[in-house]
Image (cartoon, helix red, strand yellow):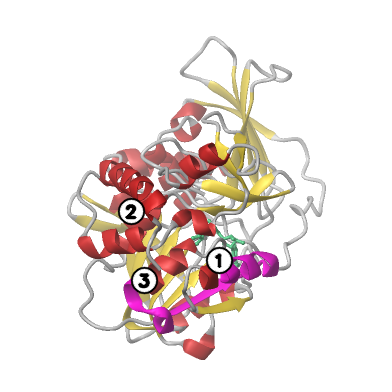
Amino acid sequence: MRAPAATAARTQQLLDQVTQFLDRPVPPALERALRTVPRHLFLPERVWCSDGQGGYDLCDRTVDPDRWLEAAYSDVSLVTQFTDSLPTSSASMPSMVLRTLLLAGLATLSRPLNVAELGTATGFNAALLCALLGDQAVTTIELDAALADVGERNLRAAGYTPKVVRGDAAAGWPDRAPYDLILATFSVDRLPPAWTAQTAPGGRIITPWNSAWCCYGTLALTTHQDGSAQGRFHRFAAFMPMRCPHPAPGTPGPTTPDGPPQTATSTLSPWAVAGGDLDAEFHVGLSVPGASFAWDTSGDHAPVRLEVADTTGPSWVTVDYDGHHNDRFAVAQSGPRRLWDEISAAYDRWLTLGRPSVDEHGLTVDATGAHTPWVEAAGRRHAIDLARCPGQPSEPQSLTPPARSARPVRIDKPSPGGTP
Ligand SMILES: C[S@@+](CC[C@H](N)C(=O)[O-])C[C@H]1O[C@@H](n2cnc3c(N)ncnc32)[C@H](O)[C@@H]1O
């Protein structure tokens, strides 16, 4: 179905914005797909746009149809659902969608591909895939049954009939495997084994990434005959995290009294690791699994305090700035993990390696599912030895994600471009 004339001009406006953001022309195949799939057909009446300050503005078609249509054809992500005040579904930012399709190699096709898209939501991305590859080539999976119904309805109304699966995308969809491409539209901190198992050797898995520390980056892996996969992170996008059908209970409390926290003075500034340097934060997040942070500026404990918690266990640390000294900070650590020591070691390594950027990092997942992150610096690949809580198994066997941190995941990085 072609976009009606009324939206053709708006589509051009969207293409111009996307081109500007990508800093290069949109390849013809992707441009054709974007012109063919009218984005407004995939949006509900009520969507929320970022207000640029960490909050959201409601945009309601019944109240202001022009503003709603303008939002539909702007290069912004639009939240379509909140759960417990956190966004849980959205229409992704079009330039991020196109960057992902480019990364997946869909601008030029040398053969037919069988693709699984994970996270149907509005159905817009699935429709673009159908426009590029044909309906038969596309399977799309959505955990939230109500959203899947809406997404499927949108797709049908726009003339597309991919296979829409209701279920947990962590399990993939074996019925149509093997896939040449698995494309997730939510972020993960580990690769579910089903994704590598269901991707053909030589196929690609593309997924936004998050750690408890830093929700950022897109991972593009190639799968191998032996069941392993390897690839790099790319410096774009912050997507909402994968949802789990049976969320784990809250952070477990200490099983034995831990005694008073261990106190020390640190020369590492909390701003160095949690002050907005994406490359440093990404490295810390990849190196210190489970660690999350929140700033306390209430002044109740210190002029400024960084609170760090282990989302997988009872350990925590506070790092206080006394309002005067930029070269020494009071640290109190508790629990089996010495989180600040782990974070300091990760930051030191990042400095020693020459401050590698997000896209100098990569990940190898071996045939057993063991994850080894790495950094390429000074012409050499350096494996990151993952920090572990004493007594923890070297690789978690369960797919259950760690309990969510109280800190909302930041999904609105202003630059170089984020989208839920
Ligand atoms: C950013 S939205 C996807 C945008 C979508 N592809 C589009 O074009 O509009 C992420 C979606 O992933 C879904 N999701 C999250 N975790 C999931 C899971 N484990 N299995 C399947 N879908 C999941 C969410 O419900 C949400 O609708």
> Given this view, does label 3 or label 2 mark the residue nearer the observer?
3
Q: Does residue 80 show up magenta in the picture?
A: no
Give the residue type at disc 1.
Asn
Give the residue type at disc 3.
Ala
In the displayed structure image, the side of residue 188 where residue 86 appears, left or right = right
In the displayed structure image, the side of residue 371 where residue 329 appears, left or right = right
Identify whether 282 is placed above or below 365.
above
Q: Horizontal and vertical percent for residue 107?
A: 24, 66
Q: Horizontal and vertical percent for residue 221?
A: 35, 68
Q: Quadrant of residue 406?
A: top right
Secondary structure under tag 2 reads strand
Q: Residue furthest bottom?
A: 175
Q: Does residue 138 show up magenta in the picture?
A: yes
Residues under labels 1 and 2: Cα distance? 31 Å
Residue at horizontal 45%, vertical 43%? 76
Give the residue type at disc 2.
His
Q: Earlier in the sequence, mark 3 or mark 1?
A: 3
Q: Horizontal and vertical percent for residue 398?
A: 63, 72
The main secondary structure of the magenta stretch is helix
Residue at horizontal 71%, vertical 20%? 301
Query: What residue is shown with label 3?
Result: 131
Residues under labels 3 and 1: Cα distance? 14 Å
Secondary structure under tag 3 reads helix
Query: What residue is shown with label 2?
Result: 234
Of the pair 199 and 275, the residue shown nearer to us: 199
Label pair 3/2, CB-CB below 8 angstroms? no
In the displayed structure image, the side of residue 205 where residue 211 appears, left or right = right
